[in-house]
Image: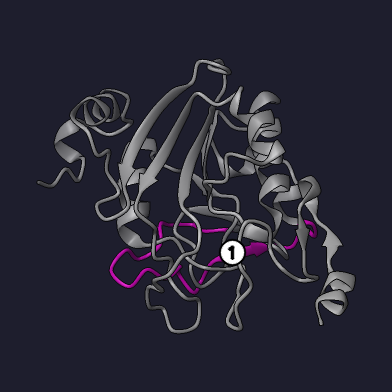
Amino acid sequence: QVENRKEKMIDAPDGLQMDPGYPPHRQKREDERDDWRTPDHIWNTLDDRFNFTGDACAGGENALAIRYFTPEGHVYLPQPPNRLNNTAPREAKRTAMPGGALTMGWDSLGGSVFMNPPYSATKDFVKRALGQVRLRKTNGVVCLVPATTDVKWFHEVSRSASEIWFYEGRISFIHPDSEEPRNGNPVGSMLLVFQYGKFGKTRLGSISSKTGLPAGERDLHYWIQHSETSPRQLRIVD
């Protein structure tokens, strides 16, 4: 049995060994999906600070930004989604552009882009995000990705990040079907922030996965001082 299992192992990105179909950095489960939604409290605090204009990895039913890419193409929303029920407007105008975020230019997403990419393609999406900022297709991208700092792609892109934030505790992402948070995330999370003109000037910080806000006083002060939103409008809670 051990030999049979070894025969099924394949070379994965960055030299990892894994079973066919296993997403990188994550243990395969029967309910494994690549379209888990970002929890509201995580999205809201990030949006308050960065004032997102687009989402590079979203689905029509769970899109949170005004403009977003889906795996099938580009979708433009004429107005922000309804924050009360977390769904995008049904009357969204759609423009079919095959290829999604990995092939299309991100200039149509605006100047501040959020991204929670599928775990199975984290490396490709993160490198694409950095490339689009370097080309100034957008001014900045905030990437919510697995905190796997041992992999090659992290060391390649982290040198260009303006900020890296590590979440204390595991984020319970929202299941796409049940719309309920799912505990037991097998890997931690981090934010990689790429901003044009600030490559390599990296600031490290810590964020609470429960509140979505920086965990320490110094980090919180930095968060407020570098926010696109006025301090009084930030969702700062005790």
The residue carrying mark 1 is 93
Q: Residue at (44%, 60%) from the top-left corner?
A: 38
Q: Residue at (40%, 62%) from the top-left corner?
A: 81
Which secondary structure class fits the magenta region best? loop
Residue 36 falls within the magenta-colored stretch: no
105 versus 38 height, above or below: above
Residue 79 falls within the magenta-colored stretch: yes
Indicate left or right for 207 with 194 as reference.
left
Q: Residue furthest left?
A: 238
222 versus 191 height, above or below: above
Q: Residue at (90%, 72%) from the top-left corner?
A: 7
Secondary structure under tag 1 reads strand
Per the rendered image, the range of residues in magenta is: 76-99
The image quadrant that residue 106 belongs to is top right
Q: Position of residue 140 (x, y in %)?
A: 53, 31
Q: Amino acid at mark 1?
A: Lys
The image quadrant that residue 87 belongs to is bottom left
